[in-house]
Image: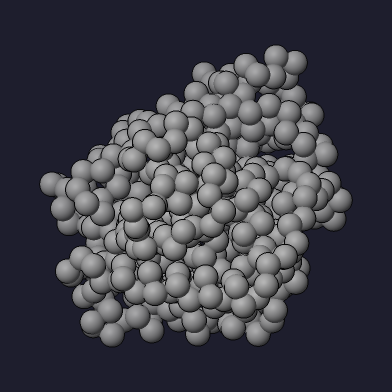
Amino acid sequence: MKYVLALDQGTTSSRAILFDKQGAIHAVGQREFPQIYPAPGHVEHDPADIWSSQMGALDDALANAPDVLPGDITAIGITHQRETTLLWDRRTGEPVANALVWQDRRTAAICDRLNAGGYAPLFAAKTGLVIDPYFSGTKLQWMLDNLPGVRERAERGELCFGTVDSFLVWKLGGGARHVTDVSNASRTLLFNIHTGAWDDELLALLQIPRAILPEVASSSETYTAVGAGHPLAGVPIAGIAGDQQAALFGQTCFAPGMAKNTYGTGCFLLLHTGTTAKVSANKLLTAVAWRIGDVTEYALEGSVFIGGAVVQWLRDGLGIIKTSSEIETLAATVPDNGGVYMVPAFTGLGTPHWDPYARGTIVGITRGTTAGHLARAALEAIAYQSYDVLTAMEKDAGIRLTELRVDGGASRNDGLMQFQADLLGVPVVRPRVVETTALGAACLAGLAVGFWANREEIARHWQIERIFTPGRPRGEMDALHENWQRAVGRSRDWVAP
C-alpha cells in the first residue's frame, strides 16, 4: 500500500488528492460545480453536483496517476465544507431538496427568535457556538418546516440528515452506514461538546427528530468500505473531519497554542487549546478539533465568511479579472489602496461581529479609483478580517502568537501573505504543501489503518516553503486598520430584519 486518498469536497469545487508516505502530493483531480443563488442571502448546492464533481475529481486524480492501481490505495479520508445541510431518502439515497450551504442566511429570523428567547447562553454552554444561520441546526429546522411533507417523513425515520461527509460516506459505502465524526457533529447546534452526544434539550428546541441524525464516530477509524461496483471497492473509509479541523491537523498543530489560518472560500483561524473546551468571551467559537481513540481535543475558532470568494466575485461578478490568479498582478499595478476599503459582507459578517444583516460595502471611491485599487482593497479585506479574528483569539487565550501557519488557495498569493504578516506583526509561515485540508484528512485516515505510526511521524514530514516577516511600521498598519473598522461600521445592519 503506497498512498492515501483524500476527498476534499469544498464550497466551489471538489478535489481528490493522492498522498504518499512522506505526505507529498502524488496526483490531483479537481472540478468546480455551480453555485445556486435563489434569493439574496440564499445559497444552495445541488447534491447531484456535489456527488458528480467529487467522483469526477476522484476519476481525474486516478487518471493523472496511471502508475497507481486500486490496490496501492490503503485508505480514504474525507473532508468538506462543514455546515452545509442535506436531507436524503434513507431507502433510495435520493436528496429531497438542494443542500443549504453554510453561507446561506435564510434562517436569520429563526436565530433572532432564539436569541430573543434568551437561549444564547444555553447553546453556548452546550455547543460552544453562537446562535447564527451559519450552523446546520436552524437550516435543518427550516427544511423540515418549509419543504412539503418532509417533517412527517423525517419523524417516521424515512430520511437522513447529514453534512457533506455523511452524504459522501453514505453514497460511497452503498448506504451501509449513516455516520459523521465528532468535529462535524459539533457544528450543528445539536451536539453537546462536553458529553459527546446529541443533546435532547437542543433537539427539542429546534424540533429535530432524533431518528434522522447520523451516528457520531471518532475522526480516525474505519467507518465502512467503498461499495461494490466502484473501482476502489473494498478500500476502507477511515478518516473524517470538517475542513478547518482537517487543516489544523494537516498543519501539525498538535500542541496547545499552535494556530493556523486557511484562506479558502472563507477564512478560518483555529487555535489548538488541548483537551479543554475553552469558553470564549470575544465571540469566538469553541470547536471540537478531533477525537482520536478516546481523547477529544478542542480549538478556538474564528470564521470569516468571505475570503477567497471575494476574488471570485471580482472575476465572475465584475469581470475585472479573467482568472483568480490574476488578482495579485492587478493589485500590484497600484502602490497602495488609494483610500479604498472593501468589506465583503456578501452573506453577513462572521467573527467577531456575527451580523447576518451586514452586506458588502466599498468606501473611499474617487474619480482616481482603478481596478487595481479594487483588487488591492479586496485582498487587504481578507487580511483585515483575519486580523480581527486573531486579536479576539489572543484575548481569549491570554497569549500572543509567535507565528501563524497558513494554507488554502489564497495563501499562494505572496502579496496577501506579506500584508498579513505586516498587519499581524508576527511571521506568517507557508508550508511546502498548502493543501493541508486534504492532507489532514489523509493523515487521519492513514493513522487509523497504520499507514503512519503516530503524529510524530506525520510532523516530521511537514516542511516550510516560505516565511513572510513583518516589515512595515506598526503605526502605519494601525492607521490602515482603523480605516477598515470605519468601513465595517458602514456595512453593519444594512438589511432590515
| 479 on left or right of 421 | left
> Which quarter of the figure is the N terminus placed in?
top right
Residue 481 position within the rendered picture, expressed as x and y whole percent measured from the top left:
51, 72
Q: Is residue 430 above or below residue 95?
A: below
| 200 on left or right of 218 | left
Q: Is residue 14 above or below residue 229?
A: below
> Which quarter of the figure is the C terminus placed in?
bottom left
201 or 187: nearer the viewer: 187
Query: Residue drawn at (23%, 58%), measured in percent from left and top?
Result: 106
Q: Does any portion of residue 382 appear in the rendered image?
A: no
Q: Is residue 149 above or below residue 203?
A: above
Residue 382 position within the rendered picture, expressed as x and y whole percent measured from the top left:
51, 58
What residue occupies the far left of the structure in this picture? 148
Residue 293 position within the rendered picture, expressed as x and y whole percent measured from the top left:
69, 59
Query: Residue drawn at (26%, 71%), measured in percent from left and top?
Result: 493
| 74 on left or right of 438 | right
**Residue 208 location, quadrant:** bottom left
